[in-house]
Image: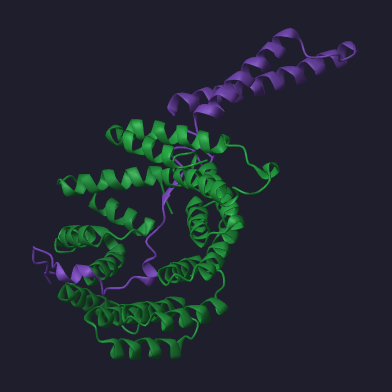
Amino acid sequence: MGLGFIVGVFGVLILSHAAYSTIQYRGLLKIMEEEFSGPPMNVVLELLLGFVFCIWAALTVPGNFHSIHPDSEENRIVSLSANLDFMIFNHRAKAFPLEIEMKLKH
Amino acid sequence: MVSKTEETQLNRLENQVDNGGGGVWEYLCLVRKLNVRRSEKVLKHGLSILNDHKKRSALGHEEWTLYEQVAIAAMDCQCLDVAKDCIKVLQKKFPESKRVGRLEGMLLEAKGSWAEAEKVYSSLLEDNPLDQVVHKRKVAMAKAQGNISGAIEWLNKYLEIFMADHDAWRELAEIYVSLQMYKQAAFCYEELILSQSTVPLYHLAYADVLYTIGGLENLQTAKKYYASTIDLTGGKNTRALLGICLCTSAIAQLSKGRNKEDKESPELHTLAATALEKDYKQKAADKLGLLTSALKSLKI
């Protein structure tokens, strides 16, 4: 989790640096009175790199994804709960008392 | 509802605590969460925590929940003194509590003094006539005394007020099945499937009841519900696979004289049979011969 987190922070920093460079580039173009056609090549590369880092961090930091299929091996319902609200104590186990004497000691 | 991962976790924790490893509190919490009935183990391990002063104080305010859990487990194992002591401790801490009052009523039930338990529950109901758990205990008491028709009456009255309580619908369905009143049981299972359609075991129980009632339409519906159980469990439920084979055979028997247009394709049956054989080969290879001979004797 530590590595993913650091990579994520790094990716966000790269993206913000790319944004700052684009703003500076536009300012420069305004001074030189030229059209803004698109950010320069290195900013585009920086954007892609930041994007890859952020996506990788977003997938690794939260950990294992849970399955959503109801019939997957981990989610499938195997048995119902024992309906303890209607539990009765008048059953055959009365004839088999516990071997060890249990007591609450206080 | 116990899922496969929860079941494996429960079994692992059970082995661990039985063999002396730690994790007792985790096991007790899991038992409470899954609502399973493991009274002997809960009693044994719960008492080991409660009798040890250090472990008890380490629980903080959760020790009262543990007292309640151990009291109920003690009543189930007929250790009524332990139950009485636990309830006394709870009464000292929470005097005038409805929850402790319920436990007192349950203790009287476990002792067999039905009239006194009835009095306790009636007084609790006077204070709060909409207490769900006390109503359910009255039903359970009627069932324990053998008064099944009284239990059905009470349960029907309860369900008129609290229609969304699926535990109660399930209990009513099981009581009807025990009395062989299958049509009413089918109605109860239909209610359950309506409210919780992703639980495959209700589909399975409904299909079983329909198969028992019999008749061509019921068999066809039963086959559909067995198929939906297989869908919801990913094919791992052996009972549903066998149900499909039996339904196909019973339908074929009933529609022998009918015209050939209504004949269903035998694909589902062959698929189910193959899945069953694979399953048996993996889990119980020595019983595979029994299975293949039984499947062969089912006439399609």
Residue at image coords 12%, 66%: A102
Q: Which residue is nearer to you in this view: B256 or B183?
A: B256
Which color has been applied to chain B in this rendered view? green
Q: Count the marks: how many?
A: 0
Left or right of B170? Residue B97 is left
Residue B262's spot in the image, x, y percent?
Answer: 68, 45
Residue B220's spot in the image, x, y percent?
Answer: 59, 51
Whether B117 is drawn above or below B292: the answer is below
Which color has been applied to chain A in this rendered view? purple
Residue at image coords 43%, 54%: B1
Q: Which residue is nearer to you in this view: B33 or B135?
A: B135
Residue at image coords 25%, 78%: B110
Residue B216's spot in the image, x, y percent?
Answer: 59, 55
Extreme residue in the left direction: A100
Residue B251's spot in the image, x, y percent?
Answer: 56, 49
Can you see residue B98? no
Q: Which residue is nearer to you in this view: B271 or B109?
A: B271
Whether A65 is drawn above or below A37: the answer is below
In which quadrant of the rendered image does the C terminus of chain A lie? Answer: bottom left
Q: Which residue is nearer to you in this view: A23 or B106?
A: B106
Extreme residue in the top direction: A41
Q: How is the image coloured?
A: by chain
Can you see residue B155? yes
Residue at image coords 48%, 82%: B153
Q: Quadrant of residue B264?
A: top right
Left or right of B152? Residue B68 is left
In which quadrant of the rendered image does the N terminus of chain A lie? Answer: top left
Whether B284 is drawn above or below B132: the answer is above
